[in-house]
Amino acid sequence: MKKKIFMMFFIFLNLFAEENFLKVNYKANEPLLGKGHYLILSDVPVATYANTIGYFSNVDIQGKVTPIQKDLETVTIKKDGEIIVRKDVKWEQYIFELEDIDLGGTKVNFRWKSLNRQRIELMISEWNLVKNDYKLEIEYQYPGKTEAFNLNISMPEFNPDIYLDFDYKAPILKKQEYGKRYLILKKVIMNDYDLEITKNRVNSNGLQLDLKSEVVIKGVEDDGYEGIVKVVPLIESYPNIYTEISNENIIDEYKEFYIGLELPTDLNLNLSYKIEEEILNLSYNRIRRRILQKVILLPANNEVTKKVALDKWYIPGQKIYIDDFKNTRGYYLLEHKGELTGKYSNFKIKVGEVEEEIDIFGESEEIHSKFIRMKVEDGRVSICIDRPNELTQGTKFEYNILDEKDNLIEVVNLEFYIEN
């Protein structure tokens, strides 16, 4: 009998504790909501917001609130046993609210509704982005009686990573590109989360992305080279067409943008270079976190390999256009590796020791090499094989494309086969 009484008493204590204790745990790996977003605390321990959808997973709730009664007179809130606010209840449009209650690093609002007395609405109005636990007691004064329950609010350490939606942890390896104004370094994407929670009196701007305007570039080969690179934020106006945007308050204006580099004109396209300083930072609450800080620029030369088969319909001297193997008769592409950079102009084409200029119209003189004649026409390389019967299977042929400074732009390796 004594055992049964003890068990009933134990169950009663647990039920009583559940009804008079509530814990709200905001998660570090989920976005938190601030001003204007009220979390509903009720007898159902599921996180929902009164006026917001899509953020139900950012809070863990344990326990229940104590419902209010219609004759509620006064609400008192204590922190660690000390009264921090006490206010007589006056309903305004069926709502009673306590605003900007300073818990020490975090400010909260509480809201009650006379038409729905089973719940409290909680809003984080300000947060210093620091981990903290607050133990509160909420006391309800009625005529002739008092009811109270304990509320624990756990705030996490701010986790800025959840706002970033791109890989930034690995060093960036980029090939240099000839003739382009901007070398596109990275696409920066921000998750579309509300950022009001990151703002406070100390930091009215909240979470910010800081993009440096200039960085130092150095030669990897220790050749003593050092120059200045302009860092430019860009948006893609049309496919592969970029427009420069302002570097101020990027995060407030754009949820995605590109980081472009304007490289010095005296870089050797055949060498590698490095950038080892802050390019992009994430700043919040007087803290700066480096996001992008290491870039390796690789040589620009492009290597292409193509294996070409000549069939029985190939006519000696017939032109083979290296950039187009569609709807052709007499030859076809067996396999290829790499892609050509496009049409050539203001370059040089070189075969062995023979070199010819490619003018602004994409035209060059013809080059003769053993069994092959080749030239550039309208920026396209064509090859003629006058004596295909002298070819052996896998005969190799190479030509190089250089710029006016003799930087190697493209290496094209060809292999020829005869169809049996």
Image (spheres, helix red, strand yellow):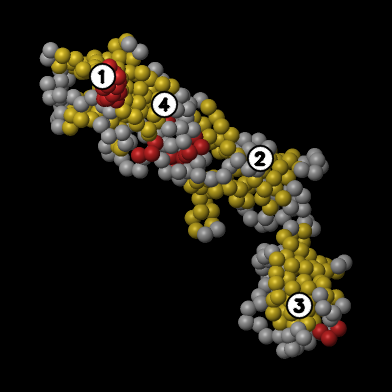
Mark 3 and mark 2 in contact? Answer it, CB < 8 Å.
Answer: no
The residue at the point 31 percent across, 40 percent down is 52
Q: Nearer the viewer, mark 2 or mark 1?
A: 1
Please report whichever mark, 3 or 1, sits nearer to the chain's N-terminal start. 1
The residue at the point 84 percent across, 79 percent down is 392
- What's the distance in space between the residues labelled 2 and 1, CA to CA? 74 Å
Which residue in the protein does label 1 denote? 1
Which residue in the protein does label 3 denote? 383
Residue 89 place in picture, x, y as percent: 17, 20
The residue at the point 53 percent across, 27 percent down is 287
Asked if residue 210 can be seen in this view, the reply is yes
Q: Which mark is residue 294?
A: 2
Please report whichever mark, 2 or 1, sits nearer to the chain's N-terminal start. 1
Q: Is residue 337 above or below residue 89?
A: below
Quadrant in which residue 223 is drawn: top right
Q: Is residue 212 above or below residue 263?
A: above
Position of the N terminus, as image quadrant, is top left
Residue 248 place in picture, x, y as percent: 49, 38
296 on left or right of 257: right
Amino acid type at circle 2 is Lys
Asked if residue 228 can be seen in this view, the reply is no
Q: Nearer the viewer, residue 103 or 284?
A: 103
- What's the distance in space between the residues labelled 1 and 4, CA to CA? 46 Å
Label 4, secondary structure: give it: strand
